[in-house]
Image (tube, rainbow, N blue to C red):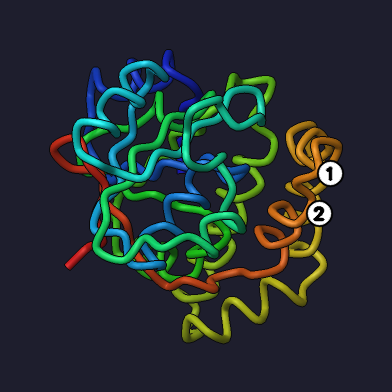
Amino acid sequence: MKCYTGPAGKADFLKAPEGLPVIIDVLRASSTIIVALASGAEKVIPVEDEAEALRLGQELQAITVGERQGIKIKGFDHGNSPNELLHADLKGKTVVITTSNGTRVMVEGGIIASTLNAGVVADKLKSQPHAYLLASGSPLKSDEDLCAALLIEYLVGKINGGERVEGAVQAATESLEGKALLEGIRGSASGRKLAAYGSSSDVEMICTQVNLYPLIPVYRNGAIRLEQ
């Protein structure tokens, strides 16, 4: 996959947006979005500006998820934490989310990817002639997203080689290459920062639960819903 990073990368991609965009902010926006939808949320609306996210959340009577620099924003219902959302009542509800990086790289038709749905994303990509990663951070601060993308590429290779998704995921989590990529997420600057902030459970979930949620969230018309 060709890689674009941050808002500048998004702008470059949009100059010639052929192929399937894959949006990854593994620590933690894309992972949180996947958990929200897996927990029954009807849709997730990503918003760049925190004041606008709070206003929209109040207007829609939605659940608000907000984070800046890894810390929950005052006035929001939840921080950007997949584990926290596991314990929230989201069934049938709208979630409005704003984060430091991930909500700034959404593009129309993009699929939201994480380790948590890496197997099913890889299965979708196996027949795609072109796929493009839009990583959330800057080129120098996207190590964890690049590791997640390489993990998905590894899975695509296994599936194209005849493995079923479950077998490909097992191979990825047991191989030296797959373990190194997951350790790259854990040991990234973002992973270490989140652990220091007391969110190590999120990091561990993301690094150990590969394809726990075999779902494809898609961003269209300003909202993220599960692919039908």
Q: Residue 199 vs residue 211: left or right?
A: right
| Amino acid at pointer 2 | Glu
Report the residue at 24% width, 41% height from top: 61
Q: 43 or 139: which is nearer to us?
A: 43
Circle 2 sits in a helix, a strand or a loop, which is it?
Answer: helix
Report the residue at 48% width, 46% height from top: 30
Report the residue at 27% width, 56% height from top: 93
Tag shown at residue 17: none
Q: In this view, does 56 lie above or below 15?
A: below
Q: In terms of image quadrants, where is residue 90?
A: bottom left
Name the residue at the left extreme: 221
Q: In terms of image quadrants, where is residue 138?
A: top right
| x, y percent for residue 135 | 51, 33
All told, the count of numbered labels is: 2
Labels 2 and 1 touching (C-beta < 8 A)? yes
Q: 60 or 82: which is nearer to us?
A: 60
Q: 57 or 227: which is nearer to us?
A: 57
CA distance for labels 2 and 1:
6 Å
Q: Which residue is identified by label 1?
A: 187
Q: Is residue 13 above or below residue 174?
A: above
Report the residue at 61% width, 21% height from top: 139
| x, y percent for residue 208 | 71, 67
Q: Residue 18 vs residue 83: left or right?
A: left
Q: Residues within 10 Å of mark 1 (few under 14, many from 20)?
A: some
| x, y percent for residue 190 | 73, 34
Q: Residue 102 vs residue 224: left or right?
A: right
Q: Is residue 145 above or below residue 91?
A: above
Circle 1 sits in a helix, a strand or a loop, which is it?
Answer: loop
Q: 127 or 94: which is nearer to us?
A: 94
Tag shown at residue 183: 2
